[in-house]
Image (spheres, coloured by chain):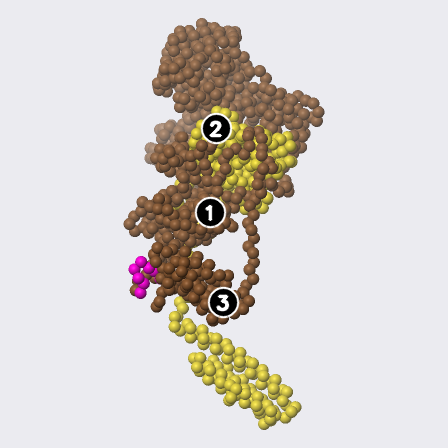
Amino acid sequence: MNVSHAWLARFVPHGRSPEAIRDLLTAHVATVEGLESLRPDLVPFVVGQVIASEKIPETKLSYNSVDDGSGTLLEVVCGAPNVTVGAKYPFARTGTTMPGGLVIEKRKIRGFTSNGMLCSARELGLGEDHDGILTLETSAAPGTPFLEVFPTGDVRIVVDVLPNRPDLLSHRGVAREVAALTGVALQMPEELAALPALTAAVVRGGQEGTAGGITVRIADRADCPQYAAAVIEGMAVGPSPAWLRAAVEAVGGRSINNLVDATNYLLHGFGQPVHAFDAARLGGATLEVRRARAGETLVTLDGASRTLAPNMLVIADGSAPTALAGVMGGQGSEVTESTTRVVLEVAEFAPALVRTTRRAVGLSTDASYRFERGIDGGALEEMLKIGAALLAQVGGGKVTGLVHLGEAPSARPVVTVRPARVAAVLGDAVPAAEIAALLTSVGCAVAASGANGALAVTPPSWRHDIHREVDGIEEVARLRGFERLPDALQGARPGTVPDHPLWVAYRRLRDALVAEGAHEVRPLPFVRGEDASHVRVRNPLAEDEPHLRRSLLESLARRAEYNLTRMQGDVRLFEVGAVFRPSSAALPHEEHRVAALVMGSRRPVHFSEPQPPAYDAWDAKALGERMAAVAHPGAVVTLRAAGEATGALWEIVADDQVVGEIRQLALDAPVWARPAFGIELMLGAMPSAPVAPPQSHAHGTATSQERRAPVRFRTLPTTPAAEFDLALLVPDAVEAAAVEAVLREAGGALLERCVLFDEFRGTGVAEGFRSLAWRLTFRHPERTLKEKEIEGRRQQLLSAVETRLDVRPRVA
Amino acid sequence: MTLSEFLASVEQLAADAPAQIAATATLDEWTAVRTALVGRQAGRITDLMTGLAALPKEAKREAGQRVNAVKATIEAALDARQAALEAAAQGASTPLDRSMPGRAHWRGAVHPVSQVIDEVVEIFRELGFTIALGPEAEGAWYNFGALNFPADHPAMDMHDTLYLGADQVLRTHTSPVQVRTLQQYPPPVRILAPGNVYRRDFFDPSHAPMFAQVEGLVVDEGVTFADLKATLSHFARRFFGAETTTRFRPSFFPFTEPSAEMDVRCGVCRGAGCGVCKQSGWIEILGAGMVHPAVLEAAGLDSETYTGWAFGMGPARTALSRHGIPDIRILYDSDVRVLDQFVS
């Protein structure tokens, strides 16, 4: 909302600077986003003082010495008759652009150099006075900005009005707040004081009425609670008077003509959108507010032809729709320069219907913006009278008829405000009398109500946002000022909500993966996908990525490709985030996962290792095991070779549940890129079913937080260990894990460690076999193992793998 | 031998020994010198010890003490020299250029937005807040209805929504977690809810269709606007620095009443007005307010017994300004050269 500082002052003579109004509104009403000078062209002008002056012979010119505060006196030629030594004038230094567009330059006039210009009011665009240069009655030093000593031009105050306060979408509305906050009384602007008296009486009716030869009708009062119209004859369309033009331009509009400007005055001045029809261009002498019929069309003021539908509200003349109610007028009945008889519409349309209509046609206007949020239905007849009189005055016409269908809304329901509750919400014991005074100051009717100082508050017709006690409390808080409310930091009871397990998992995984050298990413979850398998966004941002991802690796793969196109081949990324898939439940199935992608060098280059090896599947396997252990603490994690169909290398199993997989990723990659490996692991479903039905809760059903079994301490051994290696020839068909399982079983309780440390194929190893070597560590908890016992163990192990797996030792 | 003659030989040894030890260049030389000085067969100390026996009884005590002291000094010097020679012997095979770089591992990094969330979480943790989460694919009731958004009202225009179905949305804010948490756990509730939210905003330098938010909620008996102001001002001072000034100004959110925005004094211009604060002298940090009674009622709580306050903030904006990142899209691109700048 653009508020003119000058226009505001005509509603409430506050006597405050634009800056003071800005601070007042921001602190108590709505945020002022900025102040815009409406004469930015005058910013470069300064106060200049004439120190000496001489007539140039045979001319009207004078040759002057001017102090512009720069420290050097400037020689300036001036043609004005009123140059006086010692007087101060607006001064344009060389380089200044005049309001008319002329740039002041150093130039020679009759042999005299002129370094600037002393200015008249007309030259500054401050009026028509050109009798001489503008004398400034000021004590300000030369060089002071002109605007400081001669506050000129209005200032636009840009207010960010939020949807709950449509009453602030007008100068009167903002003025009400300023009046409440400053104690200065609200008044009618002086330009409205001299409006001609209306002689025509207001014809009232329910759904139909006739005045000034025009019949108006409301088809359904639910769509249009009130409809008023004025008929004005003998109008002459022409330029607006200066004050009206200034008002329209001050709020950022463009002056069109007296008639259109007057309707805009009502909109910006009072928040009442009105519309002027050219009576001569209406099809018949009736206006009806009704739903559009299927197939009807209307060319709106912007020239667009719009196809209408029954969910839209229109104003129809005798034959066809001629305006989109509350949104925009029609071209057919638009006022033109030849208009003489006008029908002025002043109406209240149902907010939801205006919203529907403007959305259906995709057109938001100043009018629809206000109707959607709610106008002041209680002021409709006042607006009708002011509007009719204003149009008649600026157009030189006469009001011949006034009609008002429907009634002003009845008083709003009473809201009880208890001082004790004010204190309970604000933490401040505001006295009942002050509460009453504050609420009264913004137009509420306040009466005592029952015990303990409770107040019965009736909000004014223009406030659509005061329904409950707490709305009244908000009024008290903001009018008193948030800054004045106390802010004591107090102790608090501990909450009942445990940390969400998915957050705990996220933090643990993030620490682990950062320690592994990976970078956390937070990419968008949108993917190409397919309707059958993916959740689709109904109104996607991009048609080529309309689905939500099913896998985090999809996102990481795209991010890796992004890096590859930028010649970055060492990529280690991870994300903890949500994936989605369609579900028969009310909402898609949502699951939190962790995924990591690694490719490129396993370590940074070091002089000891000029070409570090690239990540391979074994790195990915170990990383997957590590992630699974962190993500599923306490679970038994195993990695199984994944089935052919999955395309994965391993699936990750935690306590017999498949929770993830490890795969080599097929990227759109340049030839130089190293293989990329991805690990993706489920952390848990994110429940989205309702916790409890609306207006109820499910307290007491929450399960307690999972507790991890503490690690049990093992006493360190005091006896020496015995160690030996076993090199076995293992057929390709036999898995190393199977051999190791046999070794562990046969090794018994004294086998402390069993580590696969070598794989070899080639010389001395037959085709179809490989040599695998394990290092085994045995230890007896109480005594040193004897040489013979150790040899016995070795034989036991060899015989076990031979009988169980037909695996024999490799003989060197 | 008289006592003075004996002592003279001791002092002679004490004077000679350090130079002899220092002169050894190899471990072999050291062994020879050691034998010569303290060797059991013919070491000079050993000789002196033997010589002690020949001294008069009354001189033995003084001479003995002196010999033992010199012996200890020499042995210490021998040990030190041995260590030095051994170290040198090892180094001699590979001379160590200690200016060369160490063997590094890759360094990982937490995303800059997550780093901001961490700081927020840490500060509120000290005040007893725990972490709650909720779904990103959310029901319309939790996202709007329960939060007191009037149906089909201009307030909805503040949230340009991505729809998954008629009553299914990608949540437009983290506030639905307020309602889910209040339905699940009885007061006192003190939670933070960090998470991703979605708006139908096309990417531009300052907008993204998905971004992080951190929600905070306190509900208990006797919670007031004074708690809100005090807690959030405390947060601002912890987050931005002890000298930070805050201001609260009226705002509107359907789910809080009264509603406020909290600003902090612009740290760049200190309130004078500059490009960073768009000449206002203040930087908007978060939206907040007292929980609307309708929200408590939607969660099945008695709005007369309980009061609460809530806030929401966008950590991405803080991340952009604190790191001088000119375009929000950089936070999503995941260029490793960018991410690597945020190693902790």
In the rendered image of the structure, the colour used to display chain B is yellow
Residue B236 rendering spot, x and y as whole percentages: 55, 42
The magenta span reads: A764-771
Mark 3 residue type: Ala
Q: What label does residue A787 carry, if any? A: none
Measured in 3D between alpha carbons, the distance from the residue under mark 3 to the one under mark 2, in whole angstroms, is 73 Å
Assess whether mark 3 and mark 1 are in contact (beta carbons under 8 angstroms).
no
Chain bearing tag 2 is B
**Mark 2 surroundings within 10 Å by alpha-carbon count, few (fewer than 14), some (14 through 19), many (20 or more):** some
Q: Amino acid at mark 1?
A: Asp
Tell me, for residue B156, which label it has, or none.
2
Q: Which mark is residue A656?
A: 1
Q: Are marks 3 and 2 in contact (CB under 8 Å)?
A: no
Q: Is residue A299 above or below residue A141?
A: above
Q: Which residue is located at x 43 percent, y 48 percent?
A: A652
Measured in 3D between alpha carbons, the distance from the residue under mark 1 to the one under mark 2, in whole angstroms, is: 47 Å
- In this view of the protein, can residue A530 be seen by the observer? yes
- The label shown at residue A721 is 3
* Chain A palette colour: brown
Identify the chain of the residue marked 1, using the numbered disc in the image.
A
Q: Residues within 10 Å of mark 1 (few under 14, many from 20)?
A: few
* Marks 1 and 3 on same chain: yes
Q: Pick the quarter of the image with the C terminus of chain A.
A: bottom left
Within 10 Å of the Cα at label 3, are there few (<14), some (14-19), or many (20+) other Cα atoms?
A: some
Residue A611 sits inside the magenta stretch = no
Viewer-side residue, A309 vs A116: A309
Q: Amino acid at mark 2?
A: Met
Mark before the other along the chain sequence, 1 or 3: 1
Mark 1 element type: loop
| Residue A141 visible from this viewpoint | no
